[in-house]
Image (cartoon, coloured by chain):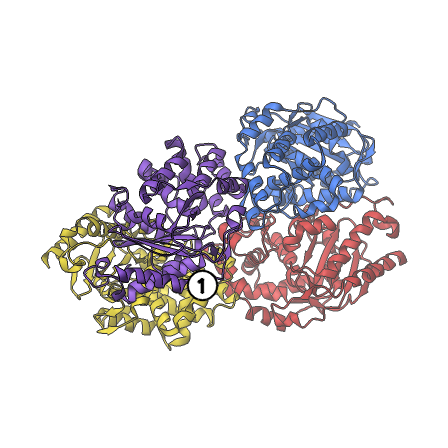
Chain colours: A blue, B red, C yellow, D purple
Amino acid sequence: MEAMQQWVESLERRARFRLGSGRVADYIPALAEQDADRFGIAICTNQGEIYHAGEAQVPFSIQSIAKVLLLTLALRVQGDALWTRVGRNPSGMPFNSLTQLEAEGGKPRNPFINAGAIAVTDRLVGAFATPSKHLRDVARRLSGNSAIHIDDAVQASEWKHRSRNAAMAYLMKAFGHLDNEVDEVLTAYFACCALSMSCVDLARAFNFLAAEGHALSAGERFIAPDLARRINSLLFTCGMYDAAGDFAYRAGLPAKSGVGGGIVAIVPGRFSVCAWSPALDERGNSVAAQYALELLADDLGRWSGIIPAGLTSGGKMTPIM
Amino acid sequence: MEAMQQWVESLERRARFRLGSGRVADYIPALAEQDADRFGIAICTNQGEIYHAGEAQVPFSIQSIAKVLLLTLALRVQGDALWTRVGRNPSGMPFNSLTQLEAEGGKPRNPFINAGAIAVTDRLVGAFATPSKHLRDVARRLSGNSAIHIDDAVQASEWKHRSRNAAMAYLMKAFGHLDNEVDEVLTAYFACCALSMSCVDLARAFNFLAAEGHALSAGERFIAPDLARRINSLLFTCGMYDAAGDFAYRAGLPAKSGVGGGIVAIVPGRFSVCAWSPALDERGNSVAAQYALELLADDLGRWSGIIPAGLTSGGKMTPIM
Amino acid sequence: MEAMQQWVESLERRARFRLGSGRVADYIPALAEQDADRFGIAICTNQGEIYHAGEAQVPFSIQSIAKVLLLTLALRVQGDALWTRVGRNPSGMPFNSLTQLEAEGGKPRNPFINAGAIAVTDRLVGAFATPSKHLRDVARRLSGNSAIHIDDAVQASEWKHRSRNAAMAYLMKAFGHLDNEVDEVLTAYFACCALSMSCVDLARAFNFLAAEGHALSAGERFIAPDLARRINSLLFTCGMYDAAGDFAYRAGLPAKSGVGGGIVAIVPGRFSVCAWSPALDERGNSVAAQYALELLADDLGRWSGIIPAGLTSGGKMTPIM
Amino acid sequence: MEAMQQWVESLERRARFRLGSGRVADYIPALAEQDADRFGIAICTNQGEIYHAGEAQVPFSIQSIAKVLLLTLALRVQGDALWTRVGRNPSGMPFNSLTQLEAEGGKPRNPFINAGAIAVTDRLVGAFATPSKHLRDVARRLSGNSAIHIDDAVQASEWKHRSRNAAMAYLMKAFGHLDNEVDEVLTAYFACCALSMSCVDLARAFNFLAAEGHALSAGERFIAPDLARRINSLLFTCGMYDAAGDFAYRAGLPAKSGVGGGIVAIVPGRFSVCAWSPALDERGNSVAAQYALELLADDLGRWSGIIPAGLTSGGKMTPIM
């Protein structure tokens, strides 16, 4: 698959032109120390092949990307009952807004804004003794990397600067939408966000969303095909903070970003991809990682010849969406 | 293609079970007279074949579905300059809200909320002598039906009950975001929404979005492939009023609804579909038409055997998204 | 009453130190031409004596000060039925906001924000053949100046730049809270705002609010004493746009400002006062006129010796509030 | 002063007709146990005479009335520097709203909404070792009743149900507008709200606002005359939650209510009054206590004969506002 490797390298080369703009997240000191010029990208095909370029094996803080795993676990545990606590529509507001949460009686719009992920975590706190360890173990199994761990310094820093997340959690609690104590839920939530994983780890871990729910690394059907399709739809409409529509317009892929600079994206039926670069735009999405995924989508749509036949549907590109 | 016809008929049969719930739009008298129990569905494949069931050849008021045509024409005329006047993100608010429009300085969130469509119409008023006739002619050409017309009674009724749309237009005007006179823009906008088309007409007219921009009926490339992909992404994130996320979760298809009861949806690479039934849910989307499209998406994902091989990618279903 | 005249002159002298800051209203050209450095002040005692200093006899555009006359006339015509269409609470929002109006179903918070005054005007359009002429005649009678007129150029300019007011009016119409046609109501409203009056005219015209409803110039009881008290309360809580609380804290007087630079204030039981200077602060209140009224309130509270005994209650100052 | 006592008794008699409507606050169990039909009223003249009727000597939870004492103490300690942390304008929103607090960067609109009182308490936490004991001691001194205490059960109940107040405090903390730890500030705030005082206690304690800052019971000038006037203005515009404008229109008195059912009102230059009855309207103000104060204001305005000459200015009523 030399062509595939060359493609990934060309994505890296072109995306690096965007290094130099954006700002590293500074809301917690543990993230602010990152070097803005790092870049990595990894693809994991549905056949289990890995192609990567740049610093694709350097672990970074996955931050909000953890929300997808939290949601997936909660749906496995609770099924559709989860949707009584969190909605499925784009918020149209910044990811940490309280205004909408108050107006809508403490039910967060979707599981990918902070309030929504906290509400999801609350369900897992009820279901697992130590939800963050459970989530870490799932991440290890899905990525086939038993070295994945929770970064204590990042977790401690999140806790110390928890005021806004605490405000959201207490507001949900005030509406009776949080079963457990705020401090316990936040502790679990911050631990999950503090998971440290590389592009290769994340591409592998999220391949089940490209493969109709089948987790190749773990050798198991992780979730049902229609659930994989639904989670992809949620990522498409709500995965990129309040820039979801813009990103959908430009790249047209289900994706989830984190303020650590990582973005995971899914090409259903073909492969999962993770790009990473710490400098963020004003909406909290990595500048260079976004650009890499836009290039990738353009290439998929236009120059299907560059991509090995096995990745396409019978040699002719099917439009991704 | 007997199997295909049987499938469409089975969709109709199953969707009819939802007749009886919902309410016909009553904000203008001309729409309120519709019989709530009507139902039709039509599919137009990328090969130009039509399959339909129920009252698929009865014309109805396309209403907000016109917004997709308005957007497409404006993008053809203005290109990306259009995006200085309207955004591309889900609004997270009802389709006729003024609050967000005021908070964001008179720039509507996207072209599928009313304010956005009015802003788009303003651009066409500048570009065409009679934009509504131009749009009607485009609709005729794309659907191959020269009998398509603007319903004068509906148009007059929209004008008479224009207060909320007028409020939005004047607010944009106050921010300097409308070049033409409010009355002129609203006149053109209402005329476009008052187009009368059937399920078959609409499935044909919108097939270019399934066919990478190629308009089979018109025998022309109507828009570039990447633009078709981008419009589909916008439909996916913003096409179903503030239920876009829910519909994406359940059906996972780009779609646009109108308060006349019609919904157009796109299965990229394969076919366009239009379902119609006048009774709406509280968010303004047709109850039975939505359900028909959910059934369709489920069938596509699960029982690919029912769908002729030519419609799928080499016999095996590619997940739609 | 030499002491009183000296006091008014000292207020003028001290207030002039604030000239030079603020900006003349520029939202309509007819107002933008005003010289920022003009200043006038006039007091009308409950005994009918006039004391003035500076350009107190120069007519200016009364603008929002007209809202108090509109309200008074509507209460005379409709009584408490008026309060079904407009509230009596501070808005907490800018005077021309649509957000709150939408959230509260088209019922404006109070009669002194634009939407509220338009709603009040709508009631007068139903009650009088030409409400603006009726209001002009009332202003003439209350001030004893038959030369008072509506400035056509200002009225025309308001109409031309009516977009935001039109947006509010159409939004109320959409909620069924406006009985008459938007254009007719706005025409009457703009005419009233375009009344041209001097500080002396306004101090005389509004003396009825200081005199328990008795209009000295007109020689009649204009409104009942408790209604005068209630209107004063409304002015206290809502009269200074969204700076009402600040002004109440600093000056503690019922007052109404207009973007023409005028502010009318009431010292119940004693006198009415009007100060005028065209340059406004960012909230739309005249900088120098506000300051003059703060000085006046301070003097009233602290150095009662300067004010003739007849103006106080038995020689000893009663705190104004 | 027999006439005065008769007047107070007539106020009680008439106000009791409103018993039976409204609901006792139930957000904390400790308050919900109150009997809805209790009623008391007490007047404290600027000469130090007390007139009371009904259950005027029964202690109740002062709740938000404590905010006036908190503000007064903070202004004594900090002076105008306090206004960098809290505004002086009506909020136009419910007293425990987060939306406005978020929109305005964590600076509460005024000291009488919860967020504002918490911000004020934060300043006192920095200034006093145990602010709640200091405030209790001030309340004892001002009312001349050394038995006044903090109700432990109420305080504990407030803490247990602190979620919404915690949300507000954490949101201010997130904006850098709270210097001390959230838990510490809330503990002090709840202790102050849990003060238990009777109508007689409160009428005495707040007489300094009627007497230009002079505290008769304590035999000291508690605050400067102009500060008393300014605090009265704040009470007038912001003291009755989001019903401030309505209450001002009906009663025209500076006043502060608490969800324990008490309302303190000020007649500047004459007397302070406290009415109490536990059943609240939907805005959180006591139904019967409000009504008693409206009757009182009407009587003051209309039938001045009933009130002893010493309470008025030279026998003739001066309009209150």
Left or right, B191 with respect to A228, comes to left
Question: Where is residue D299 drawn, in percent x and y?
Answer: 31, 64
The residue sitting at the left extreme is: C2
For this rendering, which residue is in front, D286 or D168?
A: D286
Residue A225 in the figure: left or right of residue B187: right
> Who is closer to the viewer here, C321 or A299?
C321
Which quadrant is the N terminus of chain B positioned in?
bottom right
Name the residue located 82 percent from the left edge and 39 percent from the top edge.
A315
Answer left or right for B117 relative to A210.
Answer: left
The answer to whether any part of residue C195 appears in the image is no
Marked residue chain, label 1: D
Picture quadrant where residue A319 is located = top right
Outermost residue, bottom direction?
Answer: C129
Q: Position of residue D118 (x, y in %)?
A: 44, 40
Q: Few, some or many C-alpha atoms within 10 Å of disc 1 (few <14, some 14-19, many ≥20)?
A: some
Measured as percent of width and height from the top left, residue C107 is found at 47, 63
State the residue in front, C296 or B149. Answer: C296
Element type at marker 1?
Answer: helix
**Residue picked out by circle 1:** D18
Find the residue positioned furthest to the right.
B2
Q: Is residue D237 above or below residue B317?
A: below
Which part of the image, by quadrant, shows the C terminus of chain B? top right
Q: Does B229 sit above or below residue C209?
A: above
Q: Looking at the rendering, which quadrant does residue C268 occupy?
A: bottom left
Circle count: 1
Image location of residue C102, percent across then percent down: 51, 59
Q: Amino acid at mark 1?
A: Arg
Q: Is residue C134 above or below residue A14?
A: below
For the question of whether residue B4 can be seen, the reply is yes
